[in-house]
Image: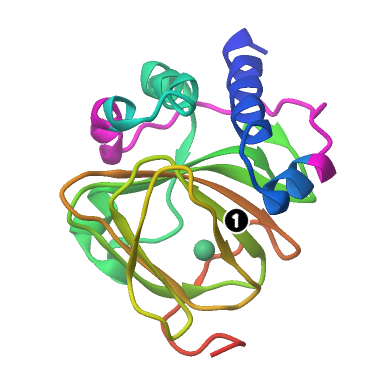
Amino acid sequence: MPIIFDDLLGRFHRYLAGVDSALVADAVARIGWDMPARPLEPRPLGCLGHLERIAELAPPAIRPLSQFVADHRGELRWGQTYTAADFGQAFIDNYGWLEVFGTRGHFVNDEVAAGVLILGPGIAYPDHHHIAEEIYIPLTGGTEWRMGEGGFHAREAGEIVHHASNVNHAMRTGREPLMALYIWRGGPLSQKSTIGGAGGQN
Ligand SMILES: [Fe+2]
């Protein structure tokens, strides 16, 4: 396995280990970090063109991870769960995720999935929900986030956004792109989110 994947996992782990949050610390402590690698062919996506700006925007604590992802984008397996039929072509052209570990990512983990999500500027990710509990940490600021029946609130880089199982959530980016670190646990790790409608807590 090329060393870049070990480097990616190490940078991901080091960033998370420095986040000042009991929720994140508990999640990190429960992850077995000695995971087997999964050989995957690289897969680029249109949204990767936002990575330079994302790396520029990153605060110092985040930069070692975001700059590494930008530098090595072409060696990584980027994915999309939605199609243009879900949210339109502009969304698909500006959306993608990198699963660092999980049931389909660069490292094998059947208990927890984690990686980064990218959204370009001016993109709405409408209400959706899923069984897994989700922790998001925006790695760039300025995106507005909404949960349950609440309104949209701008979140800064490094804030913690916690979605309980089946609670609806949505995001909309402003003038800058978003990269957000995600952790999924406690549910099917490769499930496509249910779009719109009421989640279990709505
Ligand atoms: Fe989610």
Confirm or reject: label 1 Cβ below 8 Å from ligand 1.
no
The image position of residue 64, as x and y in percent, is 48, 19
Q: Main secondary structure of the magenta part?
A: loop
User: Circle 1 — which element?
Assistant: strand
The image position of residue 157, as x and y in percent, is 41, 43
Q: Is residue 19 above or below residue 86?
A: above
Q: Quadrant of the N terminus?
A: top right
Q: Which residues are magenta?
A: 29-53
How crowded is the residue under tag 1: few (<14 C-alpha within 10 Å), some, or many (20+)? Answer: many
The image position of residue 90, as x and y in percent, is 18, 56
The image position of residue 138, as x and y in percent, is 44, 47
Q: Quadrant of residue 16?
A: top right
Please give left or right for residue 87 compared with residue 174 in the image. Answer: right
Q: Is residue 188 above or below residue 15?
A: below
**96 inside magenta stretch:** no
Q: State the residue in front, 162 or 110.
A: 162
Q: Label 1 amino acid?
A: Ile
Q: Is residue 8 above or below residue 96?
A: above
Q: State the residue in front, 18 or 34.
A: 18
Residue underneath mark 1 = 135
Residue at point 20% right, 49% down?
Answer: 121
Q: State the residue in front, 44 or 63.
A: 63
Residue furthest front in the image = 20
Residue at point 42% right, 23% down?
Answer: 60
Q: State the residue in front, 42 or 111.
A: 111
Q: Is residue 143 above or below residue 176?
A: below
Q: Which color scheme does this rendered protein use?
A: rainbow
Please give left or right for residue 29 compared with residue 73 in the image. Answer: right
Residue at point 45% right, 18% down?
Answer: 68
Please give left or right for residue 19 compared with residue 30 in the image. Answer: left
**52 inside magenta stretch:** yes
Residue at point 56% right, 78% down?
Answer: 167
